[in-house]
Amino acid sequence: TGPAPGQSQAMLTACIASVGAAYLPSQRPAPGAPLCGSARGRAAVRCAEAGTLTQSAVDDWLGSAVAARGSVASGLLDEVRSEATDVVLAARRPGRKQEAWRRTDLSLLYGATLGAPSGRVGELVAGYVEEEEEAAAAARPRLVFVDGVYSADLSDTSSLGGGAYAGPLEQVPPEVREAVLESLREIPEREADPRTELGCHTFAALNQAALSDVACVYVPSGVAVDTLRLILLSTPSYPDSGAEAGASPQLAASHPNLSLWLGDGASLSLLQQYAGRGAYFCNGLSRLRLGENASLTHAYLQEQSDGAVHVDSVLATLAAGARYDANIVQSGGRLSRVNLAVRLEGGDSHPSL
C-alpha cells in the first residue's frame, strides 16, 4: 500500500525496515529471481559483514547471520556455501505470519546479536565424553562435533567395522563423497507450497551457507552397526558474560549438519545428542537416506542449555522396504523446534515416529 495522506514514502520505508519482515512492492524480488547472484549478491555479503545492510538489499537478521558464520574446515564445501548464501540472502526470515511458524515465537532469536562460539567445551566433556569412557560400553563408537566442527580428540570410532564410516566430510569414502556433496546442494522446500510446508527452507539454507563441516555416517550394503553415538556440542561466545548492559543479548551461532547414508540391507542404531552451555543458537540440519531394505533406529535427544535456541530439520528418505524408527525427546533449550519429514520412495517402506 502507498503512504497515508501526509506521510512520505521515506517514512513508510523506515517503518517497514524497522519491522524487518516485509518489502515494498518495488523492493520485493521477482519469484525465482536470485537476489544475491553475482555482483548484487557479493555486495550484500560485504554489507552484511560490514554491518551496513539495508532492508531493500536483504533481510537484516539473515544478513547478519551469514556475516557471523565461521571458517570452513573443508574446501569441498566452498561451492555449497556459496550457492546457499545466494538462497539465504534472497529469503525472508520465518515469522508468525507464515502458516508453518504461526505457533512459534522467534522474537528471542531475532532480538539477539549472533556471534562466533568460543569452542570451550569445559564441563561438557566430563558430562558427555569422560563418563562414557568409564562406562562398560566404552567400546561403543562415538563421533563428536563442537560448534559444527569435527573434534578428533573427543571422537573414537575405532570399533566401527565392516567398512562403515563416521567422521568429517574431508575423510568420507570416495564411493559416497560425490553423492553426499550433491545432496548438500539441495535446499529443502525450495519450491514448497507455503500452505503445507514444514518451514525448513530458510534455516536449512542458512545452515548450508554457514557450514564449517559435515558429520558423515556411511554404512555399506549388508553391514550392521549396533550403536553409534553422535554428540553435537555447542558453546557460548567469549566472554560468557556477553554484550554490555543495555545492548542486545548475544547468541553464539553454530550450524551442525549430519549426512547419513545406509546401503541396501544395512542397519544402524543411532543416538544423536545435542547439548551445550551458556547462550547460543544451534541451527541443525540432518539428512538420512536409507537404501532398499535398510533399517535405522534413531534416538534423538535434545538436552540444550536453558539459554539456548534450538532449531533442527530432520529429513529422512526411504527406499523400498526400508524401515525408520524415530524417537525424539526434547528436554532443554529456552526455545526449541524440530521439523521432521519422511519421504517414501518405494513400496513397503515403513516409518515409525
Image (tube, helix red, strand yellow):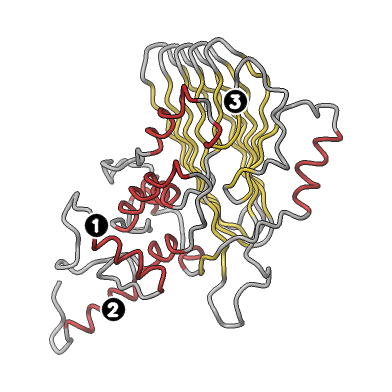
Which numbered tag is attached to residue 38?
1
The quadrant in which the N terminus is found is: bottom left
Front disc: 2 or 3: 3
Mark 2 and mark 3: span between their CA atoms?
Answer: 52 Å
- Give the secondary structure at mark 1: helix
Percent position (x, y) of residue 348?
42, 11
Which of the marked residues, 2 or 3, is nearer the chain's N terminus? 2
Q: Are marks 1 and 2 in contact (CB under 8 Å)?
A: no
Residue drawn at x 46%, y 29% as measured from the top left: 177
Seen from this angle, which residue lies furthest bottom? 6
Q: What amino acid is labelled 2 in the image?
A: Cys
Which of the marked residues, 3 or 1, is nearer the chain's N terminus? 1
Q: Is residue 65 above or below residue 325?
A: below
Q: Which residue does the numbered mark 2 point to in the structure image?
A: 15
Q: What amino acid is labelled 1 in the image?
A: Ser
Q: Which residue does the numbered mark 3 point to in the structure image?
A: 165
Q: Is residue 130 above or below residue 163?
A: below
Residue drawn at x 53%, y 37% as measured from the top left: 170
Q: Is residue 340 left or right of residue 145?
A: left
Question: Crowding near pointer 1: few (<14 within 10 Å), some, many (20+)?
Answer: few
Mark 3 and mark 1: span between their CA atoms?
Answer: 37 Å
Percent position (x, y) of residue 125?
76, 47
Residue drawn at x 13%, y 76% as measured from the top left: 2
Q: Is residue 304 left or right of residue 207?
A: right
Q: What amino acid is labelled 3 in the image?
A: Tyr
Q: Are marks 2 and 3 in contact (CB under 8 Å)?
A: no
The reply to whether residue 331 is visible in this rendering is no
Front disc: 1 or 2: 1
Mark 1 and mark 2: span between their CA atoms?
Answer: 29 Å
Location of residue 273 by image quarter:
top right
